[in-house]
Image (cartoon, grey):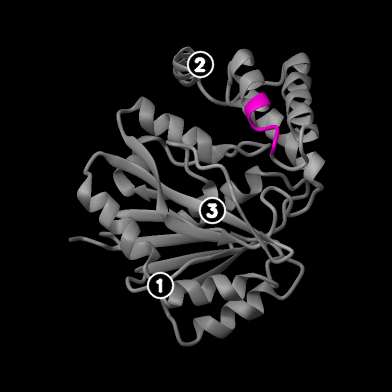
Amino acid sequence: MNNKYVLITSAHNEAALIGNTIKSVLNQQVKPAEWIIINDGSSDNTSEIVNKFRADNPFIKLFYKNADPKRDFSSKVNAIHIAISKITSLDYQYLGILDADITFDSSYYASVLSKFENNKKLGIVGGLIYDIVNGKTIPLYLHPNITRGAVQFFRKECFEEIGGLLPLRYGGEDSAACFSARLRGWEVQNFEDLKGFHHRLAGTADRSIYKARFREGFVEYHLGYHPLFEFVKGMSRFKEKPIIAGSIVRFIGYWTASVKREKRLISKELISFIRKEQMRRLIKI
């Protein structure tokens, strides 16, 4: 089995959390050939923490990116593009995106690699993410075929075929990648036995929960979601915090972007694919 993989992390002011993420990777049964970490304009001591571990682990490589004057969700993707340009391994077969606030057990990546070996059509793999907030463990919604960007793991061939990640201003590059992969015939799958722990409430790194839900509506507009699907989705997720209000705010975000006629960056072909798939799901319901 060719189990050679590369990890990429974009870290912006993650000094409080990145140490435990690094420990999780160092404890892996199968370690990455390279781990490219981009210090994305941090103003804290993120770099100092990474350098402490780098001294004894040469596969960890740290590079720097100046802070974007107007930082948004595309900043992470721009950092990932820089990281890819720094990869020196020539024969790696897999590429993993890893956020700097995630931890997991020692068998995590060995299990991920086995999923790919058992299914040659798999292009992207993800798992079940739990938010750790105030001592509580909150499982996030596990979509059948959209993996979360915090732990998104690609077959290299698939990643290259879809053209990598799109730098979307409001985020959603992980969903766009999954849709693009399936449009091209790859399978995308989440596995419940792949468990990652996210040590803050999803989407709230530098904003309130209400702003996060409003942004999610913007993201889904920019991904071309069908209005009817967006409405049904909002109603089905009303139990997510903040209860009821979160769904309303998300829907307001979607329609705000729609009224403003914000320009979408994804192709018309991909939007058509997404909407046809969503309508099929609604018909089944």
Q: Which mark is residue 106?
A: 1
Q: Main secondary structure of the magenta part?
A: loop
Query: Could you tell me residue 194's position as x and y percent?
Result: 42, 56
For the residue pair 64 and 141, the one nearer the viewer reads as 141
Give the residue drawn at x 39%, y 64%.
108
Is residue 152 among what the camera can see? no
- Based on the displayed image, in which of its 4 quarters is residue 1 positioned? bottom left
Region rendered in magenta: 235-239
The residue beneath circle 3 is 129
Within 10 angstroms of label 1, few (less than 14), some, or many (20 or more) residues?
some
In the image, 66: left or right of 60? right
Residue 19 position (above or below residue 92): below
First in residue order: circle 1 vs circle 2: 1
**SS type, badge 1:** loop
Q: Does the CB distance between marks 2 and 3 fall below 8 Å?
A: no
In the image, 137: left or right of 269? right
**SS type, badge 3:** strand
Q: Name the kind of residue labelled 2 in the image.
A: Leu
Give the residue drawn at x 51%, y 59%.
196
- Based on the displayed image, in which of its 4 quarters is residue 99 positioned? bottom right
In the image, 153: left or right of 45? left
Give the residue drawn at x 50%, y 19%.
278
Query: Could you tell me residue 76's position as x and y percent?
Result: 61, 50
Q: Which mark is residue 282?
A: 2
The Cα–Cα distance between marks 1 and 2, rounded to whole angstroms, is: 39 Å
Query: Could you tell me residue 257's position as x and y percent?
Result: 74, 22
